[in-house]
Every structure is written in structure tokens, then in C-alpha cells.
Amino acid sequence: MLGHCFNYKPVGKTTLNGIQTDLYSFKCTYNLAYVLEVEHHPDNIYIIKFFQKNHKDSSYRYSLLNKKSIRKGSSGAKNFLIILNTIIKVVLEIYSKNKSSSFGFIGSPTKDELNKKVNKANINIDGTVAQTKRFNTYGIYVKRYFSPEKFEHIEISTSSSYLIKSKKSNLKLKSVELFFQNYIELYC
Amino acid sequence: MGNIIKISKNPKTTKKAFLSSKKVIHKAKVLTPSDVKENRSMAYTYLNL
């Protein structure tokens, strides 16, 4: 069962880079507002993205981390877990309306992971980063909750991409690879 | 006079154009049910969907 969640609300729909996107908003333990973007792609693929509203104008908005001063000395792990629970609640809302829905994410690299001096081995020439911390963390998180009986878990570790594919979806593995390939080329 | 070549002064655009010309083949892997089970904490139960 899913743990505690923040109260979230839909705040509209928009089209970002030609992709229909639903927007949601919620506030975390530290009273910081977050924006959740749910992109609608063909074949019932939904790409999930979120960022702190304060960072909305930054091109690194998916990569930035909270400062220690914001976390008030705590690790921030509990707050982070509740953020993920909140996002999953939105995912479940979509899935309950369409059982063929599949959900994907790309674990954005932190600024350190983007630094060639410290992470050269994992930075690809197309700008993607392999096995980011977020990819690993979100991967562990979704494995907790999404049963392999109802979902196929598909990892593309070299680009830190992940798809939880509904078993009712007709998507083939090649199409998933092609989807993320195009996504990276067009939108990352 | 020769042709005027427009060069983007936006370094981000230039970088993106450069990066997108470099293709990397990213291979997907379907995890087996045991892969999923091995990488999760048993303290959690799957969502009842």
C-alpha cells in the first residue's frame, strides 16, 4: 500500500514542445511548491517529470537538489519519499482510467553527474548520462509498488530511462527503444 | 560579396545541434519478475491495481 502523500491539484493542461501535458501542483513538507508534468505520448505512454516551482525558469530544473538550509538539517529522505508517493498517486489515477497506460521517466543527472571531470565514464556523446542516482532511486521505488504480474519493467540504463509498461499494452521492446531514442533526440 | 552564413550565437543551440548529430544506441532490457523482486524491499506490498 502507498504511504503518506501530499495534497495535489490539477492546475491545467498545456502543450510543451508539441506534447499535450497535464500539470499538477503540490506543496512538500518544507512548504515548497512542486510542479508535476504528465506528458501524453502515442501508444498510451505517459512521461512523468517534476521540478520545484522555484526552479521553473532554470534549464536545470529537473536536475537541481535542495540545499541543506532548506532541508533544515534533515536528510530530506522522508520528504522525498512523500513526493514520490504523491506522483504515484497521480499515476494511479491515470492508470485507473486506462489499464493500457505505460509510464516512463528519465532519471536526470545531478550537476555533479554532468561534470565531465568527475563522471566522464557515464556521460554519453549524445548528452545522456548512464545510471544516474535518480534512475537508480526511482527504479528501486517503482519496483516496490508495480507488480511484474501487471507491468513489465523496462530499463535503458545507458540513458537512465525506465518504462513501467502495462501488460495490456501492445508495445514491443523495439518500439520502446525507438520511443526513448526519439525522445532524447527531440526533447532532452 | 559572398553568401552570408548565419551562425547561431546561442551556445546551447550550437551544443544541442552538435550533440544530436552524435547517435548512441541505447539498448532496453526487460526485467524478469525475479529481477524486479530481487531489487525491492520485501517490507512493501505491490499496489492492488
Image (cartoon, rainbow, N blue to C red):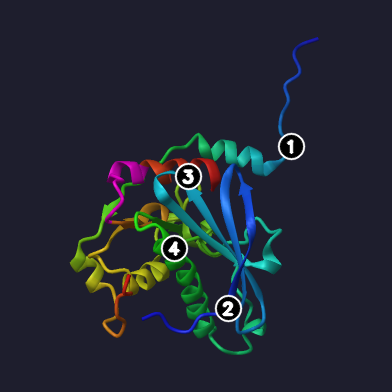
* Res. A132 mark: 4
Q: Of label 2 and label 3, which has the lower sequence position? A: 2
Above-or-below relation of A160 to A81:
above
At 41% from the left edge and 52% from the top edge, which residue is drawn? A159
Q: Amino acid at mark 3?
A: Tyr
Above-or-below relation of A6 to A60:
below
Instruction: Determine crowd level at label 2: few under 14, some 14-19, many 20+ residues with C-alpha closer than 10 A.
Output: few
**Residue B25 visible in the snapshot:** no
User: Mark 2 = which residue?
Assistant: A7
The residue most toward the right is B1
At 37% from the left edge and 69% from the top edge, which residue is drawn? A142
Q: Amino acid at mark 1?
A: Lys
Tag 2's secondary structure? loop
Tag 1's secondary structure? loop
Q: Amino acid at mark 2?
A: Asn
* Res. A183 mark: 3
* Res. B9 mark: 1
Instruction: Determine crowd level at label 3: few under 14, some 14-19, many 20+ residues with C-alpha closer than 10 A.
Output: few
Residues at marks 3 and 1, CA–CA distance in whole angstroms: 25 Å
Residues at marks 4 and 3, CA–CA distance in whole angstroms: 18 Å
Q: Chain of mark 3?
A: A
Percent coordinates x, y for residue A188 in the rendering: 54, 48
Percent coordinates x, y for residue A22 in the rendering: 57, 57
**Disc 3 to disc 1: CB gap under 8 Å:** no
Residues at marks 1 and 4, CA–CA distance in whole angstroms: 31 Å
Residues at marks 2 and 4, CA–CA distance in whole angstroms: 28 Å
Q: Nearer the viewer, residue A179 or A130?
A: A179
